Image: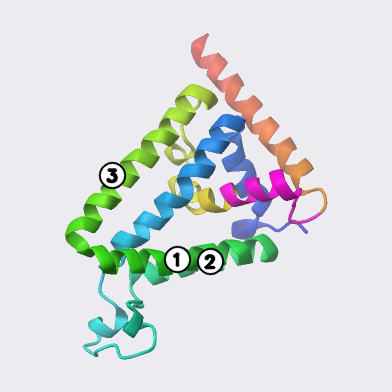
Amino acid sequence: MARKGLLDLERHFAFYGAYHSNKANIFVHTIFVWPIFFTSLILFYFTPSICELIGRQPQCFLARRGLFLNFSFFFALFYAVFYILLDFKAGSLAALLCMGCWVGASTVARAIGFSLAWKVVLGAQLFCWTGQFIGHSLFERRSPALLDNLVQAFLMAPFFALLEVLQTFFKYEPYPGFHTSVKGRIDAEIKEWQEKKQKKIS
């Protein structure tokens, strides 16, 4: 069932899909989006935990395993909850991936330390972002979504990539008629963009 407002998955998906209609570009983003999310969590691991901020030493089960309630955790949790609210089935899978990334990123960050972590993160981020910009330039021939709506692009990118995989390999859709409706919106947005582009040229 379609929703409205912030939880309008059709609107979010159509916005992102209008900038990613080329299959090659979609593939590029599917490969690079989640590594960007993962490496961001590695860097966020080094932010203070709630326990440190209130002056208490963490002695809980998670802390003994190098998992802390810091910005990395809350960043992943925010994405996880948002995706579940968008679509319970695919969102639950996305939430597991988000929290799995948090655990994995925390483990990697703890093992390599900050002095090496920031270099790894910088290298990975540059590589992945460059790949996506090249994908837009070569295949989509349209500027990335983040240039028009930064927040929506960052929020939807991981979920968009996952939904594309679920649709391609498992024919999944959040509810009957979702992809038909989204395709109509995407076609309309692309047509509007092409018309504006043509007017600028002429």
What residue do we see at 48% from left, 22% from top?
138
Q: Is residue 166 magenta?
A: yes
Lateral position of residue 47 relative to residue 90, left or right: left
- Label 3 and label 2: CA atoms lie apart by 26 Å
Q: Amino acid at mark 2?
A: Ala
Residue 21 position within the rendered picture, expressed as x and y whole percent measured from the top left: 62, 32
The secondary structure type at the circle numbered 2 is helix
Q: Residue at x 74, y 50 (%)?
A: 170
Q: Label 3, label 1: how many angstroms apart (C-alpha)?
A: 21 Å
- Front: mark 3 or 2: 3
In magenta segment, residue 43: no
Mark 1 residue type: Ala
Residue lying at 57% horizontally and 37% vertically, measured from the top left: 26
Q: Nearer the viewer, mark 3 or mark 1?
A: 3
| Depicted 172 relative to depicted 31: above or below | below
Q: Which residue is mark 2?
A: 80
Q: Which residues are magenta?
A: 161-175
Asked whether residue 82 appears in the rendered view, the answer is no
> What residue type is disc 3 on?
Gly
Q: Residue furthest right?
A: 176
Contact, mark 3 vs mark 1 (Cβ under 8 Å): no
| Image position, residue 196 (x, y; %) | 56, 22
Please report the residue visible at 22 percent of the width from the left and 50 percent of the height from the top.
119
175 or 194, nearer to the observer: 175
Which circle's residue, 3 or 1, is located before the other in the chain?
Answer: 1
Q: Is residue 166 visible?
A: yes
Query: Judging from the image, what secondary structure is the residue with disc 3 in?
Result: helix
User: Quick one: which residue is furthest to the front in this view?
Assistant: 111
* Number of residues whose C-alpha sits closer than 10 Å to that of mark 3, classed few (under 14), some (14–19) or many (20 or more): few
